[in-house]
Structures are given as C-alpha cells and as structure tokens.
Image (cartoon, helix red, strand yellow):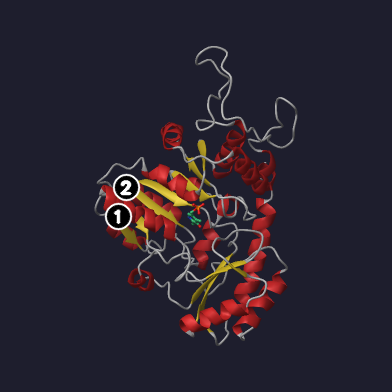
Amino acid sequence: MRFDTRLLHDGQPADPLTGAVNAPIYLSSTFRQSAPNRNRGYVYGRSGNPTRTVLETAIARLEGGATGLAFASGLGALTTLLESVPSGQRVVCVDDVYGGTYRLLEHHRRQFGLRVEFVDMSDLGRLRSALATPADLVYLESPTNPLLKLVDIAGAARLGHAAGAVVVVDNTFATPALQRPIERGADIVLHSTTKYLGGHSDIIGGALVVKDSRRGEQFRWLQNAVGAVPSPFDCYLALRGIHTLGVRMRAHGESARAVAEALSGRPQVSRVLYPGLRSHPQHALARRQMDGYGGMVSVELAGGRRAALRFLKGLRVFTLAESLGGVESLVDHPASMTHASVPRKEREAHGVTDGLVRLSCGIEDPADLAEDVVRALRGG
Ligand SMILES: *Cc1c(COP(=O)(O)O)cnc(C)c1O
C-alpha cells in the first residue's frame, strides 16, 4: 500500500470487539485478571492501553521501525530516551536544536555529567571531526529549528555508527510523510506529536520509534518505569490527526512555498530560509532526502529586532504563538520565545538573530498567507 493509504489502514484494523472503524477510547486505568498475572495483554494503564497500542503501532509502521512508543510530550519522549544514557557518556548533538531539547541536554550535563557537544551537522566534515572522539549518541534534527538547515541523514548515520553511537533523528518537522530516517540508517526516531502528527494544535504528545525490536523492548520497559505516558483521549486525537497527514503536508508545503516566494527578493528581507527554494544552500539534498519541503519558513529581516516586532504586529492571518505544525498559521520570534533558553551568545553565533522570524504555514488559502506577509513587511 502507498503512504496515504497506510495513514488510514496500516496497524489500524476495525475494533475486533465491535467493528468500530475508529479506535475506541479505552478510559479504564486497570484491567481484570482471570487469575493473578493472567490477563489479555493489558494490566494497568501506564504499562499499556489499547487506544495507545493502535497509535504506537501506526507510528511505528509509518516510520518503518519495529517498536512505537507514545509519550505525554515530545520532551517526555526525550526524557525517557535520556534515561537510557548512563552518566558520563558522550552525546554529539546538532547545534540548531529545539530549545527544550537544548535545555534538557544542558540539565543532564550539569546534573548527571553527560558530555554534550553541539555541532553544525549540515557540514558532515564537522561531524566527522567531532566523532574522532568516540560517542554514545548522535542526536539530530533535519530540517533544523529555526534555521531550516538540513543534515544528510544517511551520511550522519554512517559516521555515527562508525564511532559506536546510537543515531537518533527528531523527525517532528518533516514527519514520515516527507522523510523516513530509519530507512536511511537511523536507529531511533523521535516526534513531538503536538506538531504535524496531531496537526490541530489541540494535544501535547510525543513518540519514539525504535528500529530494532530488542532495543524497542528496553524502551518499553523505560516507558513504564518513567511513566510519561499520554492519555487515551490524546492518543485518539493523535490518530485522528495522522489520518489526514498526507493531505495536510501537501497543503502546508503549498502554503510555505507561496510565503517563501512572496518574501524573496524584498528589500526589507535579508534572507529567506526554505529548503524548497533553489536559493537554499542544501536544496539538492532536500530534493534527494525529502518527498516535499514542509510547512516551515524562516525569514531574517534586515532591520533586526525592531523590524521583526513591527512585522509580527502587521500580520493578520498568522497568529503570534509558540508551537507549529497545526492547520492554522502561526508565527514565532525565536530569540524571545522558543529559543530564549539558549544563551544569546550561542544563539547568535549560529544565526538565530533578533531579526529572525519563524513562520509555520497552515492550510489557509496560500494567497491569503502570501498577502499577509507582504502587507506586514510594508508595516501592516
Ligand atoms: C515541540 C518540539 C519538541 C518538544 O515537544 P513537546 O511536545 O513540546 O514536548 C521537540 N522537538 C521539536 C523539533 C519540536 O518542535
């Protein structure tokens, strides 16, 4: 079956009990045992829930891994992942990483002696140098947030494995509709299902997909031990979002292209970052590695912070809010919002300046979105 068909049917059979086409929401926290430790696969809602199982199986199939695990948030997934990394181990992480990921890795560095190095992996030469010292974990996003740099996932996975590392890809921005890291050699995929998989800005959720079933079972043990699990209702909403992922990602891509093209070449704009533009330094890699370019566009305004704030004020369709990946368009000022937890010096050193604005292009009419950004550039 092709991808769009699998979004609805892979790992999602009709409910065996009733024939319900959609996974029922099982709210029970516990399950009857016919004798001590004799059960039908479910014991207690933290260790497993039938609605969650459908979601976990669906995400695992879409990403091409053996085991899927759902969490209460993307950072809940990362917290559980980091529980598998003993203190003193070495992590090589992409430099332009989600702010909350940076904050949690820094916490582990200070609190538990994790050794963390941030590397610009858009240049595999730099990753190779960083991996001259053995590493236990290579952690990357592609496209990155908010600079939309790409990492050659197959190349990074080869280098990571040669250095003895487990390779983890945060696939939140691309989703399996556009990119499947496990097919390119990654060991684990992480998601914030809060974003495109949920797709409607109405849940907080996360997921891990593990390529190998033995490692998957270790993480299933950790999922239960840590307990950062989602509610059955949130699992249902994530599944409901996944059904429309294909059509939504195509619509997000159309919107993003319209917005990126409308912003390009304007005097108020110093650069437009969108992997689908031929001007993007890694456009060729994007074409090779992705089945589309996604819904995120970043733009740097020539007038710095003042111009950025004026632009935000002038927007009428885009809503100023954290988060991304929902059907409605959102705009973010990374330096003061999503990336405020990254120290200014570090932030600016790798390009997250005060003039940078990140746009999550929704599924409104692309022409309305393009008009909105042009009007805002002119001052509203
Ligand atoms: C939002 C996000 C996260 C964190 O997920 P939460 O669901 O907010 O905990 C991690 N990675 C990326 C790329 C994100 O955008």
Q: Position of residue 233 (x, y in %)?
A: 63, 41
User: Looking at the image, which is closer to me, 136 or 290?
Assistant: 136
Residue at 28% x, 58% y is 130
**Three-letter amino acid code at the position of disc 2:** Ala
Which of the two discs, 2 and 1, labels the residue nearer the N terminus?
A: 1
- Is residue 273 in view from this perspective? no
**Side of 308 relative to 107 (left or right):** right
Q: Is residue 298 above or below residue 304?
A: above
Quarter holding residue 230:
top right
Q: Secondary structure at mark 2?
A: helix
Q: Residue furthest top?
A: 35
| Image marks 2 and 1: residues in contact by CB distance under 8 Å | no
- Is residue 158 in view from this perspective? yes
Q: Secondary structure at mark 1?
A: strand
Residue at 41% x, 73% y is 351
Q: Position of residue 316 (x, y in %)?
A: 67, 75
Q: Is residue 285 above or below residue 353?
A: above
Task: Report the residue marked by disc 2.
Answer: 162
Mark 2 neighbour class, 10 Å CA radius: few under 14, some 14 to 19, many 20 or more: some
User: Looking at the image, which is closer to me, 311 or 147?
Assistant: 311
Task: Report the residue marked by disc 1.
Answer: 116
Quarter holding residue 25:
top right
User: Looking at the image, which is closer to me, 260 or 241?
Assistant: 241
Quarter holding residue 80:
top left
Q: Position of residue 212 (x, y in %)?
A: 45, 36
Q: Position of residue 15 (x, y in %)?
A: 70, 30
User: Looking at the image, which is closer to me, 305 or 261?
Assistant: 305
**Three-letter amino acid code at the position of disc 1:** Val
